[in-house]
């Protein structure tokens, strides 16, 4: 009796171990490795296929503004090996412009060289173009050299309400508020209209941020998810806006990746795919 039990137990154990090994081998096949055997981005063909399929679905014309953060006298975060965030941001912005641009999607950069721009200038640039989407590009920095990961930010509810009130107070005497022509002279009506428009824009911003994160999960990189914060560049009333943190420039490994054009191109592909997804959803 004990013999039969042990025999059945060991047979089951062998089958379980075999099953695990097989599953691990199947998973490994989905990934590609570089010469140093380090895991890099996976299923390039699948990404390219999805990218082309979604791109072909775009029927309307759209304008996307890409904002390379920092610039000029403001270098942003500085990497372990001396890389300036402003340079990474501009490099990525130029790459994603080339990847995203098409007959249907016009891509504009807030800056194309190493110059300083006020935060409000960046927002105004997108609003004057009546952009359908605004994406601010950054690379994170931390005193903790082990901190790592990709993040997407959209405006938080708390910051939104506060900014809406401040905008109302500043712009009550003007017919032109953040790209919206509000003709009501009543301050209360103006204030409520601002909140309505900003709430709608916030919802759209959150939608695109979630799409990006869901697609980023399909890559073998660490991501910190969709987060909320009161960044000034996200406070447009008319243009859905997100802020992308490509990774931590203060992390030695990620600093190296952020200087790798192939890596930046792959990230630009997944973000561009997300933009196609978003536009196809709202069209």
Image (spheres, rainbow, N blue to C red):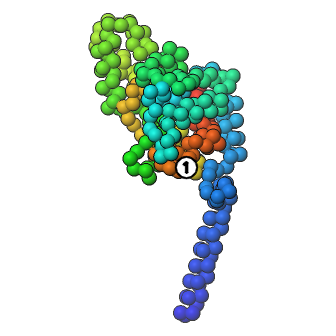
Q: Position of residue 225 (x, y in %)?
A: 46, 44
Foreground residue among 231 and 55: 231
User: From what the image shows, is residue 239 above or below residue 183?
Assistant: below
Identify the residue shown where x is 59% and y is 48%: 219
Q: Position of residue 58 (x, y in %)?
A: 65, 27
Foreground residue among 247 and 6: 247
- Quadrant (top left/top right/bottom left/bottom right) for the N terminus: bottom right
Identify the residue shown where x is 62% and y is 76%: 15
User: From what the image shows, is residue 60 above or below residue 176?
Assistant: below
Taking the view exactly as shown, the residue that stands out farthest to the front is 82
Q: Position of residue 24 (x, y in %)?
A: 62, 64
Asked if one can make out residue 207 in the rendered structure from this viewpoint, the answer is no
Asked if one can make out residue 124 in the rendered structure from this viewpoint, the answer is yes
Identify the residue shown where x is 59% and y is 87%: 7
Label 1: how many residues lie within 10 Å, few (<14), some (14-19) or many (20+)? some
Identify the residue shown where x is 30% and y is 20%: 166
Q: Which residue is mark 1?
A: 221
Q: Quadrant of residue 46?
A: top right
- Quadrant (top left/top right/bottom left/bottom right) for the C terminus: top right
Q: Quadrant of residue 161?
A: top left
Q: Secondary structure at mark 1?
A: loop
Q: Position of residue 26 (x, y in %)?
A: 66, 61
């Amino acid at each position: 009796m004990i013999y039969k039990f042990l025999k059945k137990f060991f047979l089951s154990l062998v089958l379980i171990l075999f099953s695990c090994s097989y599953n691990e081998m199947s998973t490994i096949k989905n990934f590609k490795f570089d010469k140093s055997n380090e895991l890099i981005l996976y299923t390039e063909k699948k990404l390219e296929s999805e990218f082309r399929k979604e791109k072909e679905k775009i029927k309307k014309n759209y304008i996307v503004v890409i904002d390379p953060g920092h610039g000029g006298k403001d270098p942003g975060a500085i990497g372990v090996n001396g890389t300036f965030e402003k340079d990474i941001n501009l490099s990525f912005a130029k790459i994603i412009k080339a990847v995203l641009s098409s007959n249907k999607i016009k891509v504009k950069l807030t800056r194309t060289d190493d110059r300083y721009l006020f935060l409000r200038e960046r927002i105004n640039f997108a609003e004057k173009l009546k952009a359908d989407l605004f994406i601010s590009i950054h690379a994170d920095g931390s005193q903790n050299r082990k901190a790592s990961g990709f993040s997407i930010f959209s405006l938080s509810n708390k910051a939104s309400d506060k900014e809406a009130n401040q905008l109302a107070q500043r712009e009550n005497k003007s017919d032109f508020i953040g790209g919206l022509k509000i003709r009501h002279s009543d301050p209360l009506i103006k204030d409520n209209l601002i909140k309505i428009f900003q709430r709608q824009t916030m919802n759209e911003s959150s939608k695109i941020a979630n799409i990006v994160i869901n697609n980023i999960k399909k890559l073998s990189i660490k991501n910190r998810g969709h987060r909320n914060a009161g960044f000034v560049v996200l406070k447009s009333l008319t243009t859905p806006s997100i802020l992308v943190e490509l990774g931590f420039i203060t992390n030695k490994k990620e600093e190296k990746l952020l200087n790798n054009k192939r890596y930046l191109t792959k990230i630009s592909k997944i973000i561009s795919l997300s933009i196609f997804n978003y536009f196809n959803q709202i069209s």
